[in-house]
Amino acid sequence: MTKETQYNEDNIRSLDWKEHIRMRPGMYIGKLGDGSSADDGIYILVKEVLDNCIDEFVMGAGKTIEISIQGDKVIVRDYGRGIPLGKVVDVVSKMNTGGKYDSRAFKKSVGLNGVGTKAVNALSNYFRVESTRDGKSASAEFERGELTHQEHLDETSRRRGTKVSFIPDESIFKNYKFRNEYIERLIKNYVYLNPGLTIVFNGEKFFSENGLKDLLSDSIADGDRLYPIIHLRGDDIEVAITHSRTQYSEEYHSFVNGQNTTQGGTHQAAFRESLVRTIREYYGKNYDASDIRKSIVSAISIKVMEPVFESQTKTKLGSTDMGGGLPTVRTYINDFLKRALDNFLHKNPEVTDALQRKILQAERERKDLSGIRKLARERAKKASLHNKKLRDCRIHLTDSKKERNLETTLFITEGDSASGSITKSRDVNTQAVFSLKGKPLNSYGLTKKIVYENEEFNLLQAALNIEESIEDLRYNNIVIATDADVDGMHIRLLLITFFLQFFPELIKEGHLYILETPLFRVRNKKETIYCYSEQERIDAMAKLGAKPEITRFKGLGEISPDEFKHFIGEDIRLAPVMLDKALMIEELLSFYMGKNTPDRQKFIINNLKVELDRVDEL
């Protein structure tokens, strides 16, 4: 007979605010991560502080925000009204404390629950807040949420506003690194949504005059736009729309009260639905919704009274009402588009002609592909039953909704040994493995038809669930895991080409990564150090001393499953695949994946010696 577990008053424990945040950080900032993904925790910390600065600007206080990130220290300074001096400690250390509960002061605020800066405070090993107003100032310093120092000044010449400094706690955010690209993307979204606001990041100024029109201008190159950007503004709503000449899928940027809702929500669904309805009514044709929206690149921003989001990180809107006596989100957006977009189309016949040609072209392509798609789906279903190309994670196997989870990852690898090591080492709850058979086809210059006809591409597309839209993407992180040799690099390049050619928005939205695995293992009888570069190997040898054993990993298959757990677990290192906005995708693919050209030959020759020297060093 098993002994019954004791359950009495001694088992009941109350956590204070900082203990609960530190014990359950995911409840407050989503996933932790190491900074390789745009939604990793360290960026949520920055965003939570910035949200308060943005709210000040929206209320008409302070037109400039200054951000500095040097190493692991973040400093954010606004020139708003400043926190009331007697409440400086409370607003960053007492849950459910803040000015945003007073809807008269913050009617359409980004953050409404009084948690944001408390989470930053609790999850930082150093946190300092300073407020200046009416010629006086107050400051407070904390360590992991514990108050360590307070100061009050009755006289100061500093300008009014709030300054927050913090260093994320390395015991929670392990091996983290801030990537300027993600910070800049966050900043750009803020200035797009707040024309007139200037944000200075490490000395560089960011400013937007045209709102969401500027967002689309940066998102899609001039030469790839089918027609000039349609830019529409109304009370509490702004929309920008165009279509790409080369992109296949739909691309949406959606915002609520200045918050980038990367997972969409009720407003994005209403926008997609209303866009189709308005265009059908304008042309008097019952065009298929997929033909209308194919290749669309668009953005929508709305402002809602006391919005309800589906998580603390506010990535998906759940509200159905606009608030303030206005109609539902769906009705509001539909009425706006029906009026504003219809008026625009009547006044711009060159746009309507280009748009109709695009719709008809999409219709022809869809009909041409209909038979192939049906066969491809049947093949994918059959393949999933009879082979092991996809070893899915339990979240998907047990969840009939098959919705994307922020923690889910799909590793794409090649060869039985490599896929076997990852499969045995993975977290079966959230990590899946897709095994390639040999090198993928070079898809540059090919049409979408090849995705359905090629078995590898068809099964990969089915595994990701992106045939209709990347909104249906089943994995938040897509990780290419290949050997660090010539063949592995080639496979990596071919896979990136596939995504750039047919699903570039997966890269634009930060879903594609390269798995970094160690090049060396340096160990002695007491300690083992894994090294990802030649310099790390040198440092490890110096640390261990006395001629340690050195192993050079030549491929993923050489790393045992027990060791692999270190590299795809908490200490996983991912290199995000990013697009340079200055380059058109067509030009990029043509240079690297098209026929040999004198320019590429010159590039290879100029860079070959550098690479050979590096290989010799290794």
Image (cartoon, grey):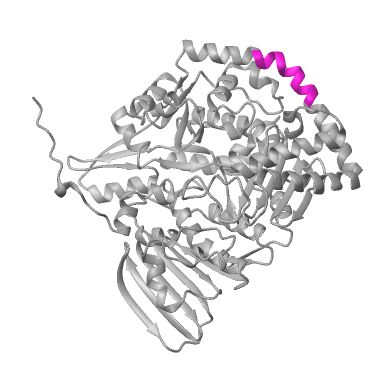
**Magenta-colored stretch includes residue 365:** yes
Q: Nearer the viewer, residue 514 or 289?
A: 289
Residue range highlighted in magenta: 363-374
Q: Quadrant of the C terminus?
A: top left
Note whether 486 is above or below 299 in the view shown.
Answer: above
In terms of image quadrants, where is residue 227?
Answer: top right
**Which residue sits at x=46%, y=48%?**
40
**Which residue sits at x=60%, y=16%?**
377
Measured as percent of width and height from the top left, residue 206 is found at 64, 63
Whether residue 395 can be seen here: yes
Note whether 198 is above or below 554 in the view shown.
Answer: below
* Circle count: 0
**Which residue sits at x=39%, y=42%?**
532
Measured as percent of width and height from the top left, residue 210 is found at 74, 59
Note whether 208 is above or below 416 in the view shown.
Answer: below
Q: Nearer the viewer, residue 377 or 56?
A: 56
Q: Nearer the viewer, residue 71 or 6?
A: 6
Q: Nearer the viewer, residue 196 or 402?
A: 402
Measured as percent of width and height from the top left, residue 65 is found at 57, 69
Q: Main secondary structure of the magenta part?
A: helix
Left/right of residue 89 with respect to residue 405 in the rendered view: left
**Which residue sits at x=44%, y=59%?**
116
Note whether 280 is above or below 313 in the view shown.
Answer: above
